Amino acid sequence: MKTTLSRVAGAIAIAVFLRVPAQAQDFQHSYAVGAGGRVRVGNISGDVIVTGYNGDTIMIRGYKEGRDRDRVQVEDLSSADRVDVRVKYPESCNCDASVRFEVSVPQSVRYNFERLSSVSGSVEVTGVAGQLKAESVSGDVQIKDISGQVSASTVSGNVSVEFSRIEGSASMKFSSVSGNVSVRAPGELDADIEMSTVSGSLKTDFPIEVLERRYGPGRSARGRLGSGVSNLRITTVSGRVSLIRAN
């Protein structure tokens, strides 16, 4: 049943991609990139939304909005083994314009997502596999149903990560300066763990030691689960940090 629904969703994604007029999307392109291919999507103002689907090509759609939308360019610097799409604004332009990227990625293929980023906007990733780096300056970063080596950060916003599984010796870091950071991990987590917050609470469902700072505010937690195959660091300056055991 799950496979059937996934196939239907994939067919719908392809149909929508083909039928929506190019002028309504402003940018649309598909890429035949194999396993291990590199993917970069860089935005300045607007969200980046990446979703896994049952297909064999990477599809990117970009929607421009705002009064000055025609002054903004979407640059495609892709090559045979790399997808590289980014937004370019005119110099010295206080433009009223933003771009929303919607990216569909084959869920059965492992890619190297070198950087998925937005300066002012959220980054959302669901149902993909491989190495992943997601960043925002002013916006939330949300990652769901992910497997592989992952890192995510924002300056002003929340970070939320839900792993379907953690494979091998991964090095993972999740951080915010002003915002909450929450990680949901499998119960069989095998990792060295470090958590900290300067101003906020700390919660963990796993058996690691929580410490109050002797001098000044803040809380931290450290511990090893299993043999410590992976490394997991969860930090914020002002906000709550939590490590939750998945059901």
Image (cartoon, rainbow, N blue to C red):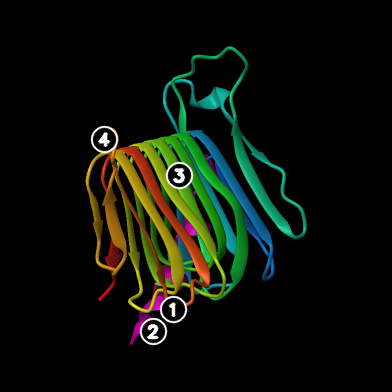
How far apart, in angstroms, are the residues tagged by discs 2 and 3?
35 Å
The residue singled out by tag 3 in the image is: 153
Q: Amino acid at mark 4?
A: Pro
Say which amino acid is labelled 3.
Ser
Q: Circle 4 — which element?
A: loop
Q: CA distance from mark 3 to mark 1?
A: 32 Å
On the question of residue 25 being in view, the answer is no
**What span is colored magenta in the figure?**
1-23
- Magenta region includes residue 120: no
Q: Is residue 68 left or right of residue 109?
A: left
Residue ID for mark 2: 4
Circle 1 residue: 7
Q: Position of residue 124 (x, y in %)?
A: 41, 52
Asked if the residue at tag 1 contacts the one at tag 3, i.e. Cβ–Cβ closer than 8 Å, the answer is no
Q: Residue at x 35, y 47 (%)?
A: 196
The CA span between labels 1 and 4 is 51 Å
Near-viewer residue (160 or 36): 160
Q: Earlier in the sequence, mark 1 or mark 4?
A: 1
